[in-house]
């Protein structure tokens, strides 16, 4: 073992020290370089930073959705910290004597009073409160859109399944975080929400009343719930969310970013710009754009004006009260669930009409989303890594399922406004509710079918484009008086984008019994898998093969076959005037290498 005093090189310790230098290394990095060097000498961080700065990011607008979520999270954290300086998380009561006349003389909790003070008394308080609330809402919209992008492009496939699940947990926690934040001011609207939440807990069979009693520290509302919510809202959930978010981003770095299909893009490279300087500049600028837009909305559009609602009073309730938009779907589910789901059995009241919508809906939906990547990979039998994204049209069943889920969500969301719809349109609320119940079942099926057909049609259109080129709308007459439309060939980059995908084929179930008549243990699983595989891939459009492309050129279809002749004749007659071709462009490429394209990648993975 080596100790500190041991001379390992055969020289004395003093001789070793003779090599020590007391001069700082000189460089031309200036003050920043000096500081960076100082830090690196103490932490060895340069290697990691260099690695990070050279990281290549592909460019696509849809990748900004995750960034908007990320920046909104930062804005929420900064503004939330500001609010904690003035917010008093207490249900102790006092009489309001502040500047807002309509509330003077009213008894209210300190939580409510301090929120009114932040809004009307603290300089900049209302703006920060509004930015906090708006950025929380934008955060959740951005998360949802980001999730759609990830789903519809298949970015959740191996090796990103863990990140998909981390994202799902994040999105669920964010809903809870939002709901609790909304409850903190203890105004009449949020108090109504808390009351509803207590009711949801009570609907859990056997243990519900114990859970509610435990959380509220006794009966409703008690004096414990706001301080407890405060701790959860500013400490517990933010810590978990920031921790999970960090893991999420680290995994994006580890896996590298996915990229959209295109020439030169493969599962083994990342084509894009490095983090430094291009992405750092872009991302830094984009943060301020997000901040600016959020501040602008917050400055112009009032949100949650609690001084107008008044403090929470369990005896008061406003008509037409609605939760924040992100809880709308769960509220809608509650409104659609039929009353007969509440019944008495074994001496207990079982309130499934409440529990299904309020307690079970979110875990069920999130579990379905969580298992989807695994189901899809089981059905396709595809265990490979995927770094090139799918174009949604090229995976019609997945896209159809995603759209069906959105339709389901949209009906639930619409149902949260059944009372408002009834009032505004002078319709019966029962009729609206019954119609929405039917739509909840029918809409996803119809939307699935329509989306799938649209995807297949778009794929057919792509095939047509690849084989025959773009229609130009220019009609050309031949010497014999025949008419053809001029077709412009696709350039090879565009062609590559349209043909570089895989169409999975349905997997057939293996024989259920072996040669000795013994039934396979996995027979029923194999059958289910084969059925699901049929469901996924029976209807499919195969990408154009090089052979088909070459054949399209020689297939004798009038426009194709005559094209070179016509083009040459036209070019002779009107030099430079005719910009297109009368065919699909198959002749530009060699038959044996119909997809010839130039590869150019920046970074080999
Ligand atoms: C706190 C919420 C979230 C934040 C701040 C966040 C942020 C990000 C960012 C900045 C990226 C890289 C850029 C991009 O691909 O858009 C990313 C990638 C990713 N996110 Fe999220 N995300 C969140 C929630 C979610 C959710 C809810 C899901 C899915 C259920 C999800 C799944 C993924 C996946 C699979 C990737 C890798 C995608 C790829 O490489 O193409 N994230 N996230």
Image (spheres, rainbow, N blue to C red):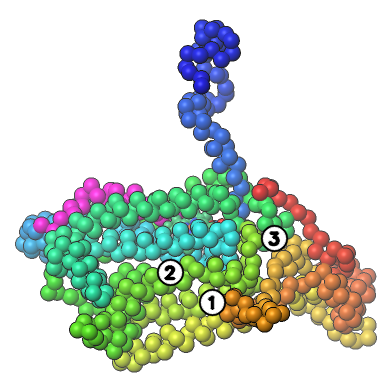
Task: Give the spatial CA distance, label 1 vs label 2.
Answer: 15 Å
User: Residue at label 2?
Assistant: 366
Task: Give the spatial CA distance, label 1 vs label 3.
Answer: 25 Å
* Vertical position of residue 395 compared to residue 386: above or below: below
Residue at 58 percent across and 66 percent down: it is: 154
Q: Is residue 236 visible?
A: yes
Residue at 61 percent across and 47 percent down: it is: 56
Disc 2 or 3, which lies upstream in sequence? 3
Label for residue 401? 1
Disc 1 or 3, which lies upstream in sequence? 3
User: Which is nearer the eye, 109 or 567?
Assistant: 109
Q: Residue 429: x percent and y percent?
A: 30, 89
Q: Is residue 291 visible?
A: no
Q: Quadrant of residue 565?
A: bottom right
First to last magenta residue range: 64-92
- Does dot 2 land on a helix, a strand or a loop? helix
* Vertical position of residue 524 compared to residue 293: above or below: below
Residue at 74 percent across and 72 percent down: it is: 543
């Amino acid at each position: 073992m080596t100790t500190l005093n041991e001379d390992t090189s055969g020289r004395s310790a003093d001789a070793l020290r003779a090599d020590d230098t007391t001069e700082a290394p000189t460089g031309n990095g200036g003050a920043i370089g000096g500081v960076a060097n100082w830090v690196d000498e103490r932490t060895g961080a340069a290697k990691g930073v260099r690695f990070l700065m050279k990281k290549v990011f592909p460019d696509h607008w849809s990748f900004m959705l995750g960034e908007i979520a990320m920046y909104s999270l930062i804005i929420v954290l900064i503004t939330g910290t500001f609010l904690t300086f003035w917010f008093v998380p207490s249900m102790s009561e006092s009489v309001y004597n502040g500047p807002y006349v309509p509330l003077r003389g009213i008894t209210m909790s300190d939580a409510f009073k301090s929120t009114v003070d932040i809004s009307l008394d603290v300089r900049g308080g209302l703006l920060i409160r509004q930015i906090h609330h708006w950025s929380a809402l934008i955060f959740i919209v951005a998360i949802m859109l980001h999730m759609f992008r990830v789903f519809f492009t298949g970015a959740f496939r191996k090796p990103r399944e863990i990140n998909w699940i981390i994202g799902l947990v994040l999105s669920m926690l964010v809903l809870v975080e939002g709901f609790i934040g909304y409850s903190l001011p203890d105004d009449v609207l949020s108090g109504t929400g808390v009351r509803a939440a207590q009711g949801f807990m009570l609907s859990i069979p056997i243990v519900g009343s114990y859970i509610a009693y435990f959380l509220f520290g006794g009966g409703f509302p008690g004096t414990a719930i706001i301080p407890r919510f405060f701790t959860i809202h500013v400490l517990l959930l933010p810590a978990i969310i920031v921790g999970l978010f960090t893991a999420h981003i680290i995994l994006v770095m580890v896996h590298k970013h996915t990229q959209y299909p295109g020439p030169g893009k493969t599962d083994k490279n990342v084509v894009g710009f490095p983090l430094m300087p291009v992405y750092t500049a872009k991302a830094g600028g984009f943060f301020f754009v997000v901040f600016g837009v959020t501040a602008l909305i917050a400055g112009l559009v009032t949100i949650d004006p609690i001084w107008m609602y008044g403090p929470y009073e369990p005896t008061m309730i406003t008509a037409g009260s609605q939760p924040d938009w992100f809880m709308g779907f769960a509220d809608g589910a509650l409104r659609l669930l039929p009353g007969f789901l509440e019944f008495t059995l074994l001496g207990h009241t079982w309130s499934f009409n409440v529990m299904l919508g309020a307690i079970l809906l979110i875990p069920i939906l999130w579990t379905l989303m969580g298992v989807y990547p695994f189901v899809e990979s089981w059905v396709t039998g595809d265990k490979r890594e995927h770094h090139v994204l799918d174009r949604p049209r090229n995976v019609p069943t997945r896209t159809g399922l995603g759209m069906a889920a959105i339709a389901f969500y949209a009906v639930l969301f619409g149902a949260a406004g059944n009372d408002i719809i009834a009032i505004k349109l002078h319709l019966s609320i029962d009729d609206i509710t019954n119609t929405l119940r039917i739509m909840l079942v029918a809409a996803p099926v119809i939307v699935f079918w329509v989306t799938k057909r649209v995807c297949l049609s778009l794929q057919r259109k792509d095939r047509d484009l690849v084989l025959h080129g773009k229609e130009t709308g220019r009609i050309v007459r031949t010497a014999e008086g025949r008419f053809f439309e001029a077709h412009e060939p696709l350039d090879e980059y565009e062609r590559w984008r349209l043909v570089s995908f895989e169409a999975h084929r349905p997997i057939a179930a293996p024989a259920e019994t072996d040669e000795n008549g013994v039934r396979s243990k996995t027979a029923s699983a194999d059958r289910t898998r084969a059925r699901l595989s049929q469901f996924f891939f029976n209807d499919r459009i195969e990408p154009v093969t090089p052979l088909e492309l070459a054949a399209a050129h020689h297939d004798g279809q009038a426009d194709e076959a005559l094209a070179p002749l016509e083009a040459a004749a036209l070019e002779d007659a009107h030099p430079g005037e005719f910009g297109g071709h009368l065919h699909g462009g198959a002749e530009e490429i060699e038959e044996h290498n119909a997809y010839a394209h130039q590869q150019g990648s920046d970074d080999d993975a």
